[in-house]
Image: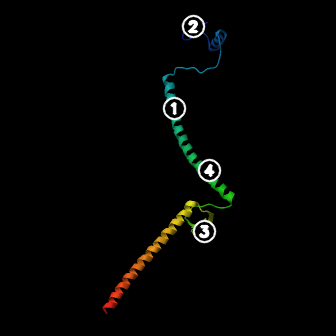
Amino acid sequence: MLNQTDKQAIYQDCNPSERKEKLKNTADKIYHKEYPIEMDEVMVAAKEKALSSVANEMLDAEEAKKIATDNLKSLRTEFENISRDLKYKKIFQMGDVFEFVDAEAKLVRIYCKEGILRETRAATNSELQNIKLKFDDAKEAKNQQSKNILGIVTIQNAIQNKIDAEV
């Protein structure tokens, strides 16, 4: 049996096959394990070159991964859009739409730029409230306009009466 004070290398006087046999016959245990080996300058230079090469390949792979990820996102979006189109048997497109709230029917109607009804849905309470506020504002504006016209007519009548009185 060997102890820690023994030589750094054993059975160096044997050829490789005899050394292996002696090691096998005298060892307490045999198992598979990773172990270190000192590198010489040539091996260090080769490992540095390999490291540089692998680092460059990693950068290239990261860039390719980013491109592939962006491409995959685009493909997923296209897949979802096509699936939705097929599910509803309609093509969905982006564009300006014109929304009209019908307070009496409590509906919202949405038209495309061609004036074609594209969607009808129930109006929300806030949409109905906004219409009421707009209606109240318009009514108030009309009342104010009527008051302004009435005031102008009153002034015109007063001026006309004064002119008639002077004549």
| Location of the N terminus (image quadrant) | top right
Q: Secondary structure at mark 4?
A: helix
The residues tagged by marks 2 and 4 sit, at their Cα atoms, a distance apart of 64 Å
Label 4: few (<14), some or many (≥20) within 10 Å?
few
The residues tagged by marks 1 and 3 sit, at their Cα atoms, a distance apart of 75 Å
The residues tagged by marks 1 and 2 sit, at their Cα atoms, a distance apart of 38 Å
- Residue at the disc numbered 3: 104
Q: Is residue 161 left or right of residue 101?
A: left
Q: Residue at x 66, y 61 (%)?
A: 90
The residues tagged by marks 4 and 3 sit, at their Cα atoms, a distance apart of 42 Å
Q: Residue at x 55, y 60 (%)?
A: 126
Amino acid at pointer 4: Arg
- Residue at the disc numbered 1: 51
Of the numbered discs in the image, which one, if any, rests on residue 3?
Answer: 2
Q: Residue at x 56, y 43 (%)?
A: 65
- Residue at the disc numbered 4: 76
Which mark is first along the chain, 1 or 4? 1
Which mark is first along the chain, 4 or 2? 2
Label 1: few (<14), some or many (≥20) within 10 Å?
few
Label 3: few (<14), some or many (≥20) within 10 Å?
few
Tags 4 and 1 in contact by the CB under 8 Å rule? no
Q: Is residue 132 visible?
A: yes
Say if 29 sits above or below 158 in the image: above
Residue found at the very far front of the displayed protein: 165
Amino acid at pointer 3: Glu
Q: Is residue 152 left or right of residue 28?
A: left
